[in-house]
Image: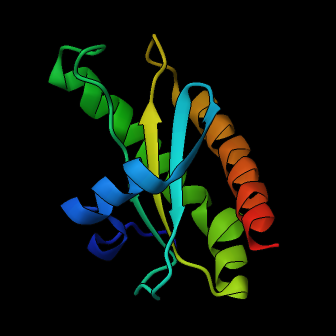
Amino acid sequence: MNTFKKEERLCNKKLLEQLFHKGSFFLCYPYRVSWLKLEEPAPVPVQVVFPVAKKRYKRAVDRNLIKRRTREAYRLNKQEHLYDMLLDTQVSILLSVSYIGKEINDFSLMQDKMLKLFKQLTAAINESNS
């Protein structure tokens, strides 16, 4: 399941507002992760958005490069590090992975940080479940 379909993208303005007002967050540099556990079941275990600040990266080319690399790191590792745990516990979450780094990193570093981010996120979800 190494795909990233439309259902997995977080586009709903009400859900986005709910995520940023009621959700929890943590830092895993160069990412700031906001997440919120959903009460009602969703069609997919995780709906995610990858924002990059226009204030920090003025050129759209740079913002798109960062988003593309982040999405690819997420897509390659989500199944074994996040989805399996969420499907076992029957939990659905909203997720925002904001890039707050000062420079554009290469893909291998972004992928390593994404794995670290998944470990922190699963620990936080398990802590909220108990």
Q: Which residue is drawn at 39% across and 49% down?
A: 21
Left or right position of 23 against 14: right
Quadrant hosting residue 104? top left
Q: Which residue is drawn at 65% across and 35% down?
A: 113
Is residue 86 depicted above or below 16 in this figure? below
Quadrant hosting residue 68? top left
The spot of residue 35 in percent (x, y) is 52, 55
The spot of residue 74 in percent (x, y) is 52, 53
Left or right position of 77 against 106: right
Left or right position of 42 against 88: left
The spot of residue 105 in percent (x, y) is 51, 20
Residue placed farthest to the front in the image? Answer: 22
Is residue 6 depicted above or below 95 in this figure? below
Q: Which residue is drawn at 82% across and 72% down?
A: 130
Q: Residue at x 49, y 75 (%)?
A: 38
The spot of residue 100 in percent (x, y) is 46, 23
Left or right position of 105 against 111: left
Quadrant hosting residue 110? top right
